[in-house]
Image: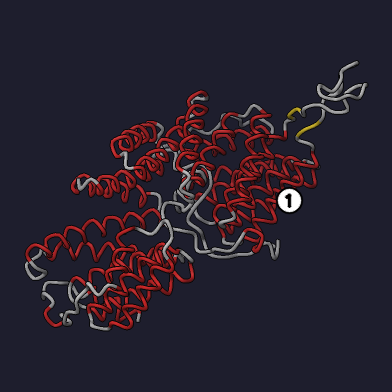
Amino acid sequence: MPMLRRADAQPEPKGVDGDPPTQRSFDSVSERCAPKSGSVAEAFGDGGMRGPRSSAVPPPPSLSGAAPEARGHALRERANLLLRRNDYANAGRDYDEALALFQAAGDALGQAQVLMDRGALRLREGVPVQAVRDYDEALALFQAAGDRAGEGDALRARGFARAEEGDLGGAVCDYDAAIQLFLQLGDREPLKPRAGSRAPSSDVDGPVASEQPRARPHGAAHGRALKARGDLRVRLRNLPGAARDYSTALALFQGAGDRGGQASVLKARGDMRLGQDNVTGAARDYDWALTLYQATEDHLGHASVLKARGDLRTRQGDLAGAERDYDQALELFTTTRDLLGQALVLKARGDLRSQQEDLVDAVRDYDRALALFRSGFERRGQAATLKARGDLRRAQFELVAELVGVAAADASDLEDALTDYDQALALFEVLEDGAGQAGVLRARGDLARIQGDLAGALSLYLSAKRLLEVSGNAAELSATLAEIARTHALAGRSVEARAAAEQSLARADRATAAVYRELAEAVLAGRIAPRPEEGGRRDSRVPSSARRHERDRF
């Protein structure tokens, strides 16, 4: 059962790392609205693991003589507490019992509320298919009871579950339906004109026909639906649509006086802007969100924004400021016993320390992050951390190999790196994350090239290229093409080398690292001399796993 991914935490949303597998525009996925069963996704929206698993179940409510509805409400409250403690098994049993009590009492709304809660549990357990079923039942009950607001919340929740299931078209339909429903409910209404009031800038006498609208209770719920659709639009790269949704949601939350809702939108918009390299706008949103979270004493929200601001400062090169933000975020996540938050910060701080060449502390952070991700069965986080730790171990091997030669380098560093890459690749394949797989394959190609196995390196790079052409990640594709060009040049294939280098530069965008532009230019300038294939001189201590992947996959 995967840990939850915060909807407002991914640099994009990338979950923990990596781009989503689809690049379709928002409007192109609304072909159908019927539910579907599909692959189990690894993420949930807001929230995270709120504390360590505990076998200590709160005592059962002393309501033996109470009415079924009262017992049902008590069990539901206890289940919610158990859910916060990540005791999913006992929470599920309490939800089931509460649901049976409400059914026996004929309490449709009680049943619907429990089904909504149990749907959230199913998402935490990583089974969105079952969550969709619970939300389907809750939706029908809300509709039968005439609870339009409940119907809108159920549509929004089902939309999220469908997105996690991979049914993006269904998610679009649900979000649109929820938003239309809240519009019909009238989350805003005109104020009644005051007698004798006049339009401030009108030359026409008479009372004002309408004034600034005022918020009604459904404004915040409408805002949550818009924010959810905005998050999905970011995921689908419809950034203008996402920006509109965020702006409207922000206005609704402001009108409703919901500072927590405002902060969540600002955090999400900051993440989007950071992904667009709008660092100034992202910093402004993060600072505003921090102020709101501090005012509401929302420690989890505060911590999530600190982590995001740390990411921003890392990108700006303010490594000391980033480390301060990460340290504060880690302290808050630890205090609130949010395991996913701790894991995300440790992974980010490990990346930072790797940049600072503080390799010992970086590995320590990665080890701790990996243990936390594994404790929650969060596979995307595990894959990203394994890839990062493998990169660090590969860098250690490469550094020694450059100084003393491959044969004299410590094969244990290489063995550890290959083990990390093997595990990361297997997880990315399960997640159907093409960009993640490509990143690992390119790293494996780098290792093969360093060992002198140019044929193996080229095979791995070409596999990464095919995956990136599907995912549409231009920066990574440009980098991979540059490595293909270098490999061809080292093998003496100048025509193929030039063609790949030209493609690399043509695909480069502002996110492409300068080192890969320079590499492609060096190939075109003929500055990379051919060298003979060295596969036959590979150190016998080097594990065969580097070749096993090529044989099994290709």
Question: Is there any visible trace of residue 441 in the rendered image?
Answer: yes
The residue at the point 67 percent across, 34 percent down is 252
Q: Amino acid at mark 1?
A: Ala
Q: Residue furthest top?
A: 196
Q: Residue at x 16, y 82 (%)?
A: 532
Taking the image as shown, residue 240 lies to the left or right of residue 511, namely right
Would you say residue 53 is visible in this rendering? no
SS type, badge 1: helix
Q: Is residue 117 above or below residue 526?
A: above
Side of 513 where 358 appears, left or right: left
Residue 487, quarter of the rendered image? bottom left
Closest to the observer, 455 or 389: 455
Instruction: Give the image location of residue 309, x and y in percent.
Output: 41, 38
Residue 320 position in % (x across, y down)? 28, 36
Q: Residue furthest front?
A: 525
For residue 519, above or below residue 161: below
Left or right? Give the position of 234 relative to 42.
right
Which quarter of the picture shows residue 429?
A: bottom left
Q: Looking at the image, what colour scheme do you see?
A: secondary structure
* 374 in relation to 194, above or below: below
Foreground pick, 273 / 470: 273
* Image-based side of 213 in relation to 529, left or right: right
| Residue closest to the eye, 114 or 321 | 321
Residue 370 versus residue 217 in the image, above or below: below
Nearest to the observer: residue 204 or residue 386 = 204
- Quadrant containing the C terminus is bottom left
Q: Quick one: label 1, few (<14), some, or many (20+) residues within 10 Å?
A: some
Q: Which residue is mark 1?
A: 177
Q: Position of residue 260 (x, y in %)?
A: 56, 31
Q: Report the number of numbered marks.
A: 1
Q: Position of residue 488 (x, y in %)?
A: 28, 79
Identify which residue is drawn at 11% across, 79% down: 537
